[in-house]
Each structure stands twice: as structure tokens, then as C-alpha cells.
Image (cartoon, rainbow, N blue to C red):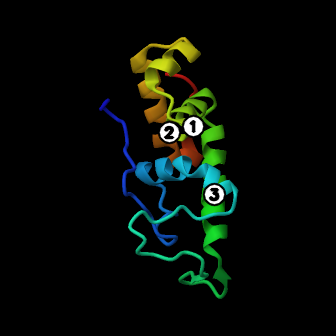
Amino acid sequence: MPRGYITLENEWYSPENVRQYTRRRMVWVIHYLGDIRQGNYPPDPDKRHEVDIPTLRKGRKYYKANRENIISVAVELMIRLEKTGQDGAMVMLHHGLGIQYESLCKMFSLSYEAVRWRVHKSLKYCEGEERKKRGYRLGG
């Protein structure tokens, strides 16, 4: 398996944990974006959790449905990826559609290392708290 590749086999995040923008969670949300756009919470592969009930958020005086929570996370992630331009598009193509780096090299006329670096850099920008301060420098 290529270095930097993230597998999602039997991986699942509860609605309370999905809001933490780690690289693995972002890739998980991208992987299930089709389900999320249809208003469905990604299924638990072990079927240990039922996710159709509203949850109470700590420090809030209202209930927020899990569907709304995951949709807001997906929208925020898409906004962050959009700010990274072509690099974000490569993230979506690779992690969302499963297009391999080799194919992305041909599509974007870049070397393998450049594609791998730009995908990595885009995901790091999306998870980072400093993204508001420093912005994103497109390309390598």
C-alpha cells in the first residue's frame, strides 16, 4: 500500500466525534460524502450504534439531529478544500472517488511526489487551526 494512503476498513465515528478535524476523520467524511448529501449518517460497520436519534450537545440548550451535525461538518470540509484549489480537487478525486495517484499525475501533469505532497498539504491545511491566519499557498 502506498505511503500516506488511508484505509477506512471498519472505521466509524460517532456524531460526537466527527467534528474533530483530524486527517482520518476528514478522509472518512469525504469517503461517505454521497451518503451525507442524501441526508444519511454513514453506517456503523459493526452495527453497534443506532444514529437516528437527536443528541444533546454539551453547553447548548437545544438538540441537534445527527444528520445536521454531519452535514455541517461536510459543508465546512468542502469550504476548506475549496480554498485549496486544485489540491483540494485532488483530495476529492483520490479519497472520494478512489482515483490513484498515478492517474492524478496524468490528469494534472504532475510528478507522483508532487501529487502526494499536494494531497497531504491540502488535508493538513483543512485540519489545522492556523488556516485562518496564514491562508493556503496553492501548488507545491
For image coordinates 64% across by 69% down, the residue present is 67
54 vs 95: above or below = below
Which amino acid, mark 1?
A: Met
16 vs 54, nearest the viewer: 54
Q: Which residue is mark 3?
A: 36
Q: Residue furthest right?
A: 38
User: Where's residue 32, x and y in %?
Assistant: 55, 52
Which amino acid, mark 2?
A: His
State yes or no: discs 3 and 2 in contact (Cβ < 8 Å).
no
Q: Secondary structure at mark 2?
A: helix
Instruction: Name the mark on residue 92.
Output: 1
Q: Residues within 10 Å of mark 1 (few under 14, many from 20)?
A: many
User: Where's residue 135, x and y in %?
Assistant: 59, 39
State yes or no: discs 1 and 2 in contact (Cβ < 8 Å).
yes
As drawn, is 18 to the left or to the right of 89?
Answer: left
Q: Which residue is mark 2?
A: 95
User: Where's residue 78, x and y in %?
Assistant: 64, 46
Label 1, label 2: how many angstroms apart (C-alpha)? 5 Å
126 vs 104: above or below = below
For image coordinates 58% across by 26% down, the residue present is 138
As drawn, is 68 to the left or to the right of 16?
Answer: right
For image coordinates 42% across by 26% down, the residue present is 116
Q: Residue furthest bottom?
A: 61
Which amino acid, mark 3?
A: Ile
Q: Residues within 10 Å of mark 3 (few under 14, many from 20)?
A: many
**In which quadrant of the rendered image does the N terminus lie?**
top left
109 vs 24: above or below = above
Residue 96 found in image quarter: top right
- Nearer mark to the viewer, of 1 and 3: 3
Residue 18 in sight in this render:
yes
For image coordinates 46% across by 26% down, the residue present is 100
